[in-house]
Amino acid sequence: MLDSGESLPGGMPKNPDGRIGVIPNREVRRAPLDWEHPKGPDGKYVPLIPFETFDQFSGGDDSEDAKLDYEEIRGMMMPDFSGTDPGNIGVSAYESYTDGTPISPVFPDTPEGRFALLRYCAENASITDESKKLGIAQRKADIGEWAAVLFGNMPIIDFESGRVELLDEQPPK
């Protein structure tokens, strides 16, 4: 363990009490298998809020000050994929530290596709975002940790067959 005055690898300061904070901010989003998340002029992904949260931004308080313009809201959100053929919908991992950018390609929403998503994330993505202010470092994670963060509610991982079964049989959100 590092003494409280030392830095973490990369020069990141530790919290004063010597602990390291880890805040997983990852989620699964459903999208068509051929979905390409939009990029801005700088080539970076444009953060998009999940479409399912539309009511949080448009409903409730009817005052003009409380509502954003409909087109402004839609421009900040993922498209509504509810009319897409269910056989063409897959799952992708997104960071939720900002309003949401992809950290994986879209994989089929099947037991094999979910396993491929977890393997991709374990090999290519960080389970946390770096925050020097909060003393949080980027951190890799194994398939089991990714399964808990992305699918919660105790998914069943079969490493031999390369499958992930969800206990509640509900598609990931």
Image: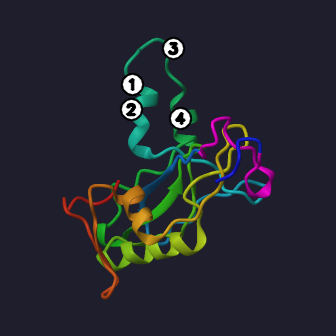
- Is tag 2's residue or tag 4's residue first in the polypeptide sequence? 2
Farthest left residue in view: 168
- Is tag 3's residue or tag 2's residue first in the polypeptide sequence? 2
Distance in Å between CA atoms under marks 1 and 4: 11 Å
Q: Residue at x 24, y 65 (%)?
A: 166
The residue where tag 1 is placed is 59
Q: Amino acid at mark 2?
A: Asp
User: Are there few (<14), some (14-19), or many (20+) residues within 10 Å of tag 2?
Assistant: few
The residue where tag 3 is placed is 64
Disc number lying in front (3 or 2): 2
Report the colour scheme.
rainbow
SS at mark 2 in the image: helix
- Is tag 1's residue or tag 3's residue first in the polypeptide sequence? 1
Q: Which residues are magenta?
A: 6-20
Residue 7 is a magenta residue: yes
The residue where tag 2 is placed is 55
Q: Residue at x 71, y 46 (%)?
A: 3
User: Are there few (<14), some (14-19), or many (20+) residues within 10 Å of tag 3?
Assistant: few
Q: Residue at x 52, y 56 (%)?
A: 94
Distance in Å between CA atoms under marks 3 and 2: 15 Å
Q: Amino acid at mark 4?
A: Ile
Looking at the image, do the residues carrying marks 2 and 1 touch, with CB atoms under 8 Å apart?
yes
SS at mark 1 in the image: loop
Q: Amino acid at mark 1?
A: Gly
Question: Residue 120 location, x and y as percent?
Answer: 51, 74
Q: Amino acid at mark 3?
A: Glu
- Is tag 1's residue or tag 4's residue first in the polypeptide sequence? 1
Q: Residue at x 39, y 24 (%)?
A: 59
Looking at the image, do the residues carrying marks 1 and 4 touch, with CB atoms under 8 Å apart?
no
